[in-house]
Image: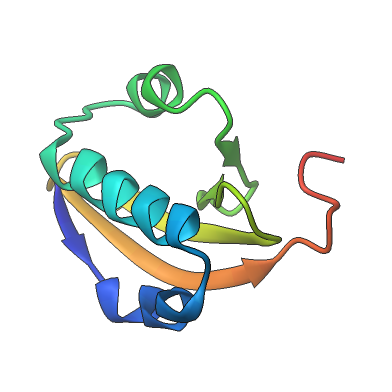
Amino acid sequence: MRLIGREKLCCLSNAEERVKKWVQSWAAEVANANWKHPAELGAQFPNVKQMEDGRFLFPVNGCAQAISLLVAFPQGVALITALEDTNGSYGS
């Protein structure tokens, strides 16, 4: 996937080392993915939450943030739209 919007992750650069490593690994996995359907994305990331508007929320390991990702499967493009504060309510 072509991953666009990595600059939105820069606010996590001041986070703990384990969070920074998680974000780097996540970005590498997304960039190397070749998803054709949402089910393939969900199989690779079981903790992802698909929103009604088509975005996917990835909870960031070790902090109360989730990465909001919009994916154009046919084009092979993934756009980071925002970091969202979960306030510990992810998945509820």
**Residue, x 58% and y 54% (percent of image)?**
53
Quarter placement of the N terminus: top left
Q: Where, by quadrant of the figure, is residue 38 drawn?
A: top left
- Scheme of colours in the image: rainbow
Name the residue: 85% across, 51% down.
Answer: 89
Number of residue marks: 0
> In this picture, is 53 found above or below 40?
below
Residue 63 position by quadrant: bottom right
In the visual, does 92 lie left or right of 33?
Answer: right
Q: Residue at coordinates 37% horizontally, 66% vertically from top-left?
A: 80
Q: Residue at x 22, y 27 (%)?
A: 36
Q: Nearer the viewer, residue 55 or 48?
A: 48
Up the image or down, 10 lies above or below 77; here it is below
Q: Position of residue 2 (x, y in %)?
A: 12, 55
Instruction: Establish if 45 lies above or below 78.
Output: above
How far from the left and from the top, in percent, is residue 55? Answer: 51, 52
Image position, residue 24 (x, y; %): 28, 55
- Quadrant that contains the C terminus: top right
Q: Residue 88 at what x, y percent from top left?
A: 83, 54
Query: Of 17 and 50, which appears nearest the observer?
Result: 17
24 vs 14, left or right, is left
Would you say 14 lies left or right of 49 here?
Answer: left
